[in-house]
């Protein structure tokens, strides 16, 4: 490899079950910057965290989801070791689920906001406030969701935090913990994805299928979407805006003057309605803009991410021994499939390689 990677992100909770194998893989990947990993709360014992720190990880995301016992019973997940993680890592993110259906129940009305406050009292670097998006269902109380997130933002600002992206609250001065806003990335392992600028690749989700391709010296790619210049720029701009702003200079340098000019034109409505303000050679979302983008993110999830995810998970479900417990809730017949995804699929789909 001519150049080392600038950062490493290990997703999911499974790798922490096999620390020996994980350490062996890490020794083969040259990384100059941040090494980040997701850890399930039930895995985040002091011994596990110590071993991850010894491997060179300096950022960790704890999928706590909630610290409220009643909410945890609904989720079926324990929470653990956020304080232990703070003592061991330079950057700690805590994932919290926002479900306004729970908020409507009086006994749980303040659970999420209390969780936000608890994270900030512990001094975590980032709180990721993920709205619950049930697979195959789209009913939610949009106004209440906006109100809850606005209150969380107010709590954050009073505690020395700021809303740095659509779903994240960051301690002022801390580095962000992120994976989805990387402009280019290479995915390794079953279920991972890669973005090479104008092409988006998704690896096989089926572990057996993935292994068979690797053993057969074939690229383990299940789907390839050829974005091209315009769709590639749209993808890039979408995740830039998720991070709170848009840099037209970056669009010009990466995709040309025509695309930069188109971006400036599309930015006029947000600027005129107060959803964005000008900043340097770009724009920055306001509180109003973050709210609108939150709704846009939900639409993108429902109409693009969910149907793609359902299709590539189908092979995972079809493998021998899948059974009911293996992601059966994400079966294709339960996924939303509208015209938007069908058109995008026909326009962008290419043979894997």
Image: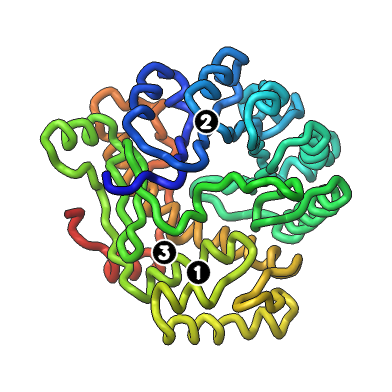
Quarter that holds the N terminus: top left
Nearer to the camera, 222 or 157: 157
Is residue 304 placed above or below 172 in the rendered structure? Answer: below
Do residues under tags 1 and 3 come within 8 Å of each other at their CB atoms? Answer: no
Would residue 156 be seen by someone viewing this image from the given angle? yes
Res. 73 visible in picture: no
Crowding at mark 1 (Cα within 10 Å: few <14, some 14-19, many 20+): many
**Label 2 belongs to which residue?**
57
Q: How many residues crowd around disc 2 within 10 Å: few (fewer than 14), some, or many (20 or more)?
A: many
243, above or below 85, in the image: below
Residue 91, quarter of the rendered image? top right
Q: Nearer the viewer, residue 28 or 227?
A: 28
Q: What residue sits right under mark 3 in the picture?
A: 338
Secondary element under disc 3, as helix, strand or loop, is loop
Left or right side of 239 for 256: left
- Residue beneath disc 1: 237
Give the Cα separation between the discs numbered 3 and 2.
Answer: 41 Å
Indicate the position of residue 240 as horizontal and vertical percent values: 54, 64
Across and down, in percent, residue 239 comes to 52, 61
| Left or right of 338 in this view: 171 | right
Horizontal relation, residue 272 to residue 30: left or right: right
Q: Secondary structure at mark 2?
A: loop
Query: Who comes first in sequence, dot 1 or dot 2?
Result: 2
Q: Residue at x 71, y 85 (%)?
A: 272
The quadrant holding residue 345 is: bottom left
Work out which residue is located at the far left of the displayed protein and give it: 216
- 219 above or below 147? above
Q: Element type at marker 1?
A: helix
């Amino acid at each position: 490899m001519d150049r080392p990677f600038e950062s490493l992100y290990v997703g999911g909770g499974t790798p922490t079950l096999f620390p020996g194998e994980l350490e062996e893989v890490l020794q083969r990947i040259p990384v100059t910057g941040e090494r980040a990993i997701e850890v399930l709360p039930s895995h985040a014992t002091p011994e596990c965290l110590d071993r991850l720190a010894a491997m060179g990880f300096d950022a960790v995301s704890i999928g706590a989801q909630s610290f409220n016992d009643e909410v945890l019973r609904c989720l079926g997940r324990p929470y653990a070791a956020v304080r232990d993680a703070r003592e061991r890592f330079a950057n700690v993110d805590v994932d919290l689920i926002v479900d306004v259906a729970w908020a409507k129940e009086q006994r749980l009305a303040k659970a999420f906001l209390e969780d936000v406050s608890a994270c900030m009292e512990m001094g975590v670097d980032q709180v990721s406030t993920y709205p619950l998006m049930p697979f195959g269902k789209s009913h939610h109380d949009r106004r209440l969701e906006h109100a809850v997130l606005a209150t969380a933002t107010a709590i954050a600002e009073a505690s020395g935090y700021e809303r740095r992206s659509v779903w994240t609250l960051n301690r002022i001065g801390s580095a962000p913990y992120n994976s989805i806003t990387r402009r280019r990335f290479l995915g390794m392992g079953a279920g991972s994805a890669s973005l090479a600028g104008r092409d988006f690749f998704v690896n096989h989700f089926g572990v057996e299928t993935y292994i068979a391709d690797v053993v057969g010296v074939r690229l383990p790619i299940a789907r390839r979407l050829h974005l091209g210049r315009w769709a590639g720029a749209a993808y890039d701009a979408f995740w830039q805006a998720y991070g709170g702003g848009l840099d037209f200079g970056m669009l010009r340098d990466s995709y040309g003057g025509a695309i930069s000019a188109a971006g400036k034109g599309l930015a006029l409505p947000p600027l005129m309605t107060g959803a964005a303000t000008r900043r340097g050679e770009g724009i920055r979302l306001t509180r109003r803009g973050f709210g609108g983008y939150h709704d846009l993110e939900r639409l993108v999830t429902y109409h693009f991410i969910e149907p793609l995810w359902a299709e590539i998970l189908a092979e995972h479900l079809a493998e021998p021994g899948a059974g009911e417990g293996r992601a059966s809730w994400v079966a294709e017949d339960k996924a939303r499939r509208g015209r938007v995804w069908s058109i995008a699929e026909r326009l962008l789909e290419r043979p894997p390689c």
